[in-house]
Image (cartoon, rainbow, N blue to C red):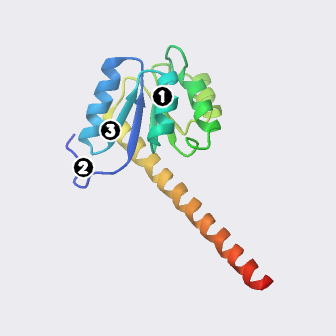
Amino acid sequence: MPAMSQPPTAKILVVDDEDAIREYLQQILTEWGYTVITAADGREALPVAVREQPDLILLDIAMPHLDGIETCKRLRERPTTRAARVIILTAYDTRDRLEESIAAGADDFLGKPINLTELRLRVTSMLKVKDTADAVERLEAYIRSLKELRARDTAS
């Protein structure tokens, strides 16, 4: 697929224990204009996510040390990584794994082998969700500050 005409600025963390898959996704996403960082497993991904603050995380479900389900749970527990959108990647296309992924806090689920059209659509969709959530958060902060100003003015 050709690169997008206006490159996105989103940062994506790709977490997969298979070097070939991780490198392939990095190459494709970079060609599409994204900033891509990688980790080989969940244990490596957690500090990378805290440090890099990715907008989206593509997270393999079956990895050594710390699997995708547990990694997703831990990402959701941390205030600094909670807002990142998470797409679980797996060769196991079963309802149980899907339910487990969503219960752990994943936003979406993508089967392997990865279809590039589906990947692009899901990445684009999740980044729109992230942008919307970020905008809502900014508006809520603005409203809180206005209420504080009003309370101070009323108290004066």
Picture layout, residue 136 above or below residue 16: below
Picture layout, residue 90 above or below residue 105: above
CA separation in Å, label 3 and label 2: 13 Å
Callout 2: SS: loop
Q: Residue furthest left?
A: 2
CA separation in Å, label 3 and label 1: 26 Å
User: For the N terminus, which image quadrant?
Assistant: top left
Residue type at mark 2? Met
Residue on which the image places disc 1: 45
Residue type at mark 3? Thr
Residue 54 pos. (x, y %): 45, 42
Q: Earlier in the sequence, mark 3 or mark 1?
A: 1
Q: Which mark is residue 4?
A: 2
**Cβ–Cβ under 8 Å for marks 1 and 2:** no
Callout 1: SS: helix
Residue 108 pos. (x, y %): 51, 37
Q: Is residue 11 left or right of residue 33?
A: right
Callout 3: SS: helix
Q: Residue at x 48, y 28 (%)?
A: 45
Residue on which the image places disc 3: 117
CA separation in Å, label 1 and label 2: 27 Å
* Pick the front one: 151 or 67: 151
Mark 3 or 1, closer to the camera = 1
Q: Earlier in the sequence, mark 3 or mark 2?
A: 2
Query: Callout 2: 10 Å neighbours few (<14), some, many (20+)?
Result: few
Query: Which quadrant of the view contains residue 101?
Result: top right
Q: Residue at x 24, y 49 (%)?
A: 4
Query: Callout 3: 10 Å neighbours few (<14), some, many (20+)?
Result: few
Mark 3 or 2, closer to the camera = 2
Q: Is residue 147 left or right of residue 34?
A: right
Q: Residue at x 48, y 36 (%)?
A: 49
Q: Residue at x 30, y 38 (%)?
A: 29
